[in-house]
Amino acid sequence: MAQERTLAGVPDTTYIPLVARIYVSKRFPDYFRDEQALALESQIPGEAIQANSGEYECLASVARSHVIDGKVSAFLAQHPGGNVVFLGGGLETTWGRVGVASAHCYQVDLPDVIKVRRRALGQAANEELIAGDMFAMEWADRIDRSLPTLLVVSGVWQYFHEDEILGMIAGLKVAFPAGELVFDATDTEGLKFTNKYVEKTGNTDARMYFGLDDPQAFADRAGAQLLSVDGFYADALKLGRRLSLRTRVFMYFADKWGRVKVVHLRLNPA
């Protein structure tokens, strides 16, 4: 009987950013290199994601990670003993790239995903893996909420509806009154492109619903303070002609038109 793959059982969409991180780490290591992702390359099942993931699609995913890495690093520089909580982290490897020994990392995801994450990536000395539904909020009881806390939601909320997300933010505001939140979003036009791409990878059941056109209006609806909104591609565009013309054009206009963004909120206005 064939040996079970380490990554068996992870929801299909978890593989897409992992494939992207491998692709970019090999082609543009001076921009982004992820040793943990490279170590998992042989364990990704099937070939549909690789076959349908071009240069732009891979850089879109990695550019998001690159910007969020910067947000986490800036938070840790200001709060070296604080918490960083990844909600719906899947096989995300941000902590392996930018984590510091003095801080506390928490990875929250569904039990089956946490089980596979533990096998595939292990657990750092200052990292805790919490199995549970991120919307249910029980996981918050496992965290020292007296410490400064940054909550990170990457590549997750697009699969939910805005009322569900606002309800979750309401819970985060109570649980982490001095907390900050970083998440990525796509506008409603960009979601059309993204849904087509996910379907091409072979996953026809992972429809995306949450599109964010006006971050300030969303922050107002959430009762939060908007700290910043960043496009994905300012640093990636510096790769210049090493990228295809298609990739450069797509990246330029995606940032210019606000198609994709990383949003940083203070949960409760100062």
Image: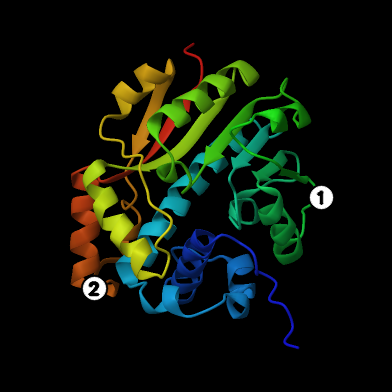
Disc 1 and disc 2 in contact, CB within 8 angstroms: no
Where is residue 15 drawn, in percent x and y?
Answer: 52, 65
**Circle 1: residue type:** Ala
- Left or right: where does residue 29 sit relative to residue 127? left
Residue at figure coordinates x 25%, y 66% from the top left: 247
> What is the secondary structure assignment of the residue under circle 2?
loop
Where is residue 40 drawn, in percent x and y?
Answer: 63, 73
- 75 versus 146 height, above or below: below
Q: How is the image coloured?
A: rainbow
- Left or right: where does residue 110 sit relative to residue 183? right
> What is the secondary structure assignment of the residue under circle 1?
loop
Residue at figure coordinates x 62%, y 77% from the top left: 43
Judging by the rendered image, the residue that carries numbered circle 2 is: 244
- Looking at marks 1 and 2 on the same chain, the residue that comes earlier in the sequence is marked by 1
Residue lying furthest bottom = 1
Categorize mark 1 by other alpha carbons within 10 Å: few (<14), some (14-19), many (20+): few
Where is residue 130 drawn, in percent x and y?
Answer: 73, 43
- Left or right: where does residue 30 sit relative to residue 232? right
Residue at figure coordinates x 65%, y 69% from the top left: 7
Judging by the rendered image, the residue that carries numbered circle 1 is: 125
**Circle 2: residue type:** Ser
Q: Quadrant of the N terminus?
A: bottom right
Residue at figure coordinates x 77%, y 31% from the top left: 142
Where is residue 220 drawn, in percent x and y?
Answer: 35, 17
